[in-house]
Image: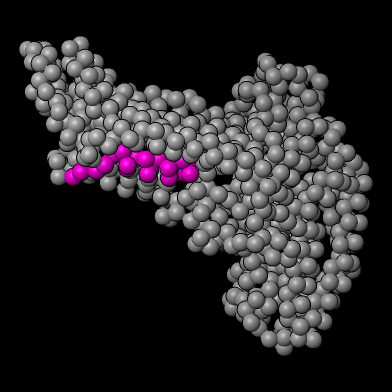
Amino acid sequence: MWDDAFPSFLIGLREGLEAGLIVSILVATLVRAEARSRLPQVWTGVLAAIAVAMSFGAVLTFTAASMPQTAQEAFGGVLSVIAVAFVTAMVFWMRRSARNLSSELKQKVAGALAMGSGMLILTSFLAVGREGLETALFLWTTAQAAGESAGPLTGAAIGLLLAAGLCWGLYRRVLKINLTKFFTATGVVLIVIAAGVLGYGLRDLQEGGVLPGKTAYAVDLAGSIDAGSWYSTLIQGVFNLMPTMTWLQVVAYVAYLAVVMTLFVRGVRVTAPKAKPERRPETVTQRSAGASGEGSAARKPAARRRPVWVVPAAVVAVPAVVAGLFVALGRPKPAGDQTVAVSETDCGKGFTAPEPGRQTFQMHNTGRQASEVYLVDPSTNAVYGEIEGLAPGTTRDLVATIAGGTYAWRCVPASGKAVTSKAVTVTGGGAAKPVAPVSEQDLAAPLKSYKAYVGKGLDTLAGQTRALQHDIEGGHLDKARTDWLTAHRTYASLGAAYGTFEDFDKKIDGRADGLPGGERDKDFSGFLRLEYGLWHGRSAKELTGPARQLSTDVAGLGKAFPSQDFDPGDLPLRAHEILENTLQFELTGDTDEGSGTNLATADANLAGTRELLTVLEPLLTDRAPKVLPTVDTDIDRVQKLLDAQHDGGHWTPVEKLSDADRRRLDGATGQLLEDLAPIPDLLEIRKSA
């Protein structure tokens, strides 16, 4: 966790010390000016600055969380670049201003005392507020890069506490620090860290589609270094340098370091001689000790007293309330907030005019018999969405794209007359386009092509499992491990999701979950049984039986598949279900029995999904021409992320993925599943309404 915590610790220490120095100087100036009664005004300004900074952080966090994945990445990328700009300006400003900070603030305090309490509050607020906003932005950026790690917040908390302790020591004259040297040293380190943040931010902008070149890799060390090792984790956490980086990231990183570090070091050399005549380190104590009676303006009669808690409470509450309203109003309203009744008597109850766009309706059967339900234009009978066989008392989602037009629900009970609900009118969003009905005949050609693909793959698989069997029988276990992966990838590319191959799938690729003996259970068989044995030191003799059984089961599937009942309506479902399995089992490492090749299986699953989409392309292009281009982009993105995790036959195990890589892979797969979700509805076989 420390690798994620260090950058935030440094920014918390440095920014906390800057803000603490400012507060210490303000307080010392008022004390020297015998204006202690005005101290609450300083603390009010400080509280206001803290409240604004925390509210800013909350807005960043919760508005980003409500965005789609690609939008989150673009948003995070933009803020990362802004954070780099702020940090860069901050290190240069503090290097230049450290010596004159005290005199500048004392001048401002003197002016504020003359102008009234409001100006003193504003002075402390502005002096501390900038540090707070910079801290919030930089911490949010580093927390995004660290994923679920608590390191950034922990590091920042430690840094801020240490800064508070240092400032107390400086103010009480029990501690001396050469502030010029401190801010110079930390400035150098922060410039290096900011270069990494810049690279990370540009990568997010590439992933979000804002910048090009997301697949143009300048560095690809994913296959040659261990992403989960301590040194790799340390480098990634502290410097945001990844094993795989694009040309844009590398060029920006090098250019930023070369330009900014040169200017910073040159500035240090230019200003350093000016410090020599003083012959002593600068401390807050020495600065504040120089304060004189220049605060005589403060010795005016006190104004009429007001309740001391009103203004502090307001400056804390107002930013929080504004931030809460911003988050609440900025969150998109859920698309599926309408529950619509389906029955002979309640058809369409609960239906109100929806907003234009893709909407999800909760269809609840309140009747006593199964029913079909259609979203229609009652004047033309055009169908925009449907559900068949909705059982009594059950609820299912119906997804439809809503545009300008008239809509109603048509409920068709299993043994009754069709009932049409009251119509509603939607304005805006263009003209609505009905979903062209799909028949079994429409899916006949795609199904034939896909079954031919699977049949050919099963023939290949049969030969590969026989080779695997011969390896084990001959005692060649190293070769068996290689041949096991080849055969398993072939099987995973055939779309074995949700019982595609009936009972054969459990025999060939079943898991040990739920078996009384676990991996040692006699009913545990197939690829995962062999994987467990091959990677847990089992002998060839122990594995010969399972290998022969696997060959037999694969041969049996090859013979049975042509006559298996493959409902044409299930074909569109596979486009979503294969990768749903992948996200649930492979990308969690749930099915890993020791080989660490879950990502290889995910890669094969992706290939199987591509094949399905190829055979479904003509039907999808006619009904939703924008779906496939979007999905193709998503698939390419997932493919690149998977490609970065293997070198030849070696794949990075899921548990050794870096937090950033795992987050990107899960997010990209989730986005792909989201864009695949409409396909089953678009190609659902529809009967006449």
> Picture quarter containing residue 421?
top right
Q: Measured from the top left, where is residue 601 in percent x and y?
A: 71, 61
* 560 in relation to 77, above or below: below
Which residue is depicted at the point 21% across and 14% down? 111
Residue 228 lies within the magenta run = no
State the count of labels: 0
Which residue is depicted at the point 85% across and 45% down? 614
**Majority secondary structure in the magenta region:** helix
Of residues 541 and 2, the one drawn nearer to the viewer in this rendering: 2
- The C terminus is located in which quarter? top right
Residues shaded magenta:
175-194
Of residues 579 and 559, the one drawn nearer to the viewer in this rendering: 579
Q: Measured from the top left, where is residue 149 in percent x and y?
A: 46, 51
Q: Measured from the top left, where is residue 494 in percent x and y?
A: 80, 59
- The N terminus is located in which quarter? bottom left
> Picture quarter containing residue 31?
top left
